[in-house]
Image (cartoon, rainbow, N blue to C red):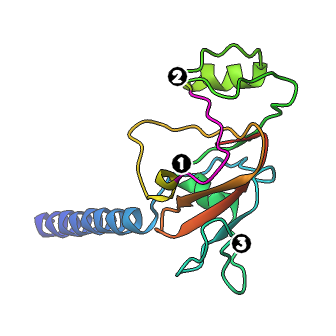
Amino acid sequence: EGSKICTMIANFTLFLLFLAFLTTVTAKRCKGVALPDDFDGSDWPEMWRLRSGMGEREEENRRTPNVAVSPSVLARAGVQHWKLDPSPYDYPGKAIPWNDTVEDPELAAIREEFDYNYADIISVTSRVESFWDEHFHGDKTIRYMLNGTGYFDLRSVDGDWVRIAVQPGDFF
């Protein structure tokens, strides 16, 4: 009977080691955050994978054929998106820092929920070279498109570049 107990303990230990190995392998292959069951990316803007050897940066630079990207790809990287309506509010053209003088209840609710307490407003009227260099932000970074259109390029958890076509009201 002692031999059976030793065999059971050895088998159990092997099973635990296998589970630890499986967990490690799975964690390495499944980078990113889990999506909530009710995730709905229907209000996200159009996104696609950038082609390699990108041409002019201001162009769409889609692959041929185009490789559309599901919003879940960036959501798994921790990116969040809201579609707000900035049009009823009078935002300044530039404010560094911005003292949040606009009474937008949706924006106020997001800032409160996530404890966002600093903001700048800038107007981009032409190409800004420093925007094109890959860089990282130590803190959470928010981008809210008040007017105009443009592109944001982000890396997915698998390292591919994803281009997002942004319009007024896109809040990341």
Q: Residue at x 66, y 26 (%)?
A: 110
- Disc 2 marks a residue whose amino acid type is Tyr
Q: Nearer the viewer, residue 5 or 69?
A: 69
Residue 134 position (above or below residue 66): above
Magenta region, main secondary structure: loop
The image position of residue 19, as x and y in percent, is: 33, 64
Question: In terms of sequence position, does the residue under pointer 3 or pointer 2 come before the other?
Answer: 3
User: Which region is colored magenta?
Assistant: 120-128
Q: CA distance from mark 3 to mark 2?
A: 33 Å
Instruction: Estimate how packed mark 3 is, as few (under 14), some (14 to 19) or many (20 or more) residues with alpha carbons within 10 Å.
Output: some
Q: CA distance from mark 2 to mark 1?
A: 20 Å
Quadrant position of residue 83: top right
Pointer 3 residue: 68
Pointer 2 residue: 118
Q: Nearer the viewer, residue 154 or 133?
A: 133
* Residue that sits furthest to the bottom in the current view: 64
Residue 5 position (above or below residue 118): below
Residue 125 position (above or below residue 129): above
Q: Nearer the viewer, residue 74 or 87?
A: 87
Name the secondary structure under disc 1: loop
Compared across the picture, whether 4 is left or right of 121 comes to left
Q: CA distance from mark 1 to mark 3?
A: 19 Å
* Residue that sits furthest to the right in the current view: 88
Magenta region includes residue 154: no
Pointer 1 residue: 78
- Disc 1 marks a residue whose amino acid type is Gly
